[in-house]
Image (spheres, rainbow, N blue to C red):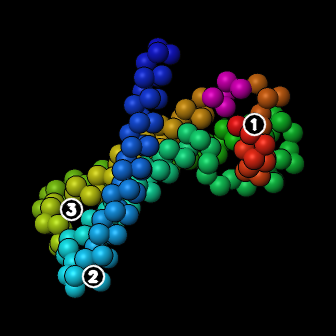
Amino acid sequence: MKKFFEIVDVIVGTINQTMAVVGLSLGVLLAFINVILRYAFDMSLTWAGELTNYLFIWSALFGAAYGFKRGAHISVSLLIGKFSLAYQKFFLIFANIISILYLGLISYFGYQLVLMLVDFGEMSVDLNIPMWIPHLVLPIAFALAAYRVCEKLVELYKTDTKDIKLYNEHEDIIKEIKGEH
């Protein structure tokens, strides 16, 4: 079973990283090309603005899903750090459960939105593609993010209470500067 989750972890990580990097790279490249065309040749690609928006949205949401794996999202640990280690673990588990519920709901409602858009048959203005295609990012990215938080929850649950460490970005930056990462 452990091997199965390792494979799923690699697949999910690959999807998240690839979509984030490719979306951002293509979005920047397309925006750059369109700016050059507009200012140097007095023309532009009419569909480039819409596609650039979709690429950046996909990139941001898949990147956010990857951020859950890295523990890179903002967390306020000042208050929780005042409690005993047992309470810290409890609050962290509770926060992860709330996150999973939230991300799962957004994924579900994103799926419902996609189904609704399929039924309506709405098309995008500039790209002339069905609107459900760009909106697929919602159920997929949020489901992958929920999966990542589930991984963190299991990891946190298995961690001994005395080994609970709150994430502090400034400590990570200091370690990175010193070459300890």
Q: Position of residue 110 (x, y in %)?
A: 34, 54
Viewport quadrant of the C terminus: top right
Q: Residue at x 73, y 55 (%)?
A: 76
Question: Which residue appears at 46% of the width and 15% of the height?
Answer: 3
First-in-chain label (3 vs 1): 3
Dot 2 surroundings within 10 Å: few (below 14), some, or many (20 or more)?
A: few
For the residue labelled by badge 3, is the local secondary structure a helix, a strand or a loop?
loop
The residue nearer to you, when weighing 40 against 173, is: 40
Above or below, 10 against 81 in this view is above
Above or below 45: residue 163: above
Q: Residue 158 lies in magenta, yes or no?
A: yes
Q: Where is residue 173 shown, x and y percent of the image?
A: 74, 49
Instruction: Left or right? Give the position of 11 relative to 156.
Output: left
Residue 122 vs residue 148: left or right?
Answer: left
Q: Which mark is residue 40?
A: 2
Image coordinates for residue 8, horizontal then vertical, percent:
42, 27
SS at circle 1: loop
**Residue 71, image quadrant:** top right
**Is there a contact, CB below 8 Å, between mark 3 and mark 1?**
no
Q: CA distance from mark 2 to mark 1?
A: 47 Å
> What type is the residue that disc 2 sits on?
Ala
Which secondary structure dominates the residues rendered in magenta? helix
Q: Nearer the viewer, residue 12 or 95?
A: 12
Q: What is the span of residues highlighted in magenta in the rendered image?
A: 155-159
Residue picked out by circle 1:
180
First reached walking from the N terminus: tag 2 or tag 1:
2
Q: Could you tell whether 112 is left or right of 118 in the image?
A: right
Q: Amino acid at mark 1?
A: Glu
Look at the picture and state if 135 lies above or below 37: above
Image depth: mark 3 or mark 2 in front: 2
Determine whether the residue tagged by mark 2 lies in a helix, strand or loop. helix
* Residue hosting label 3: 131
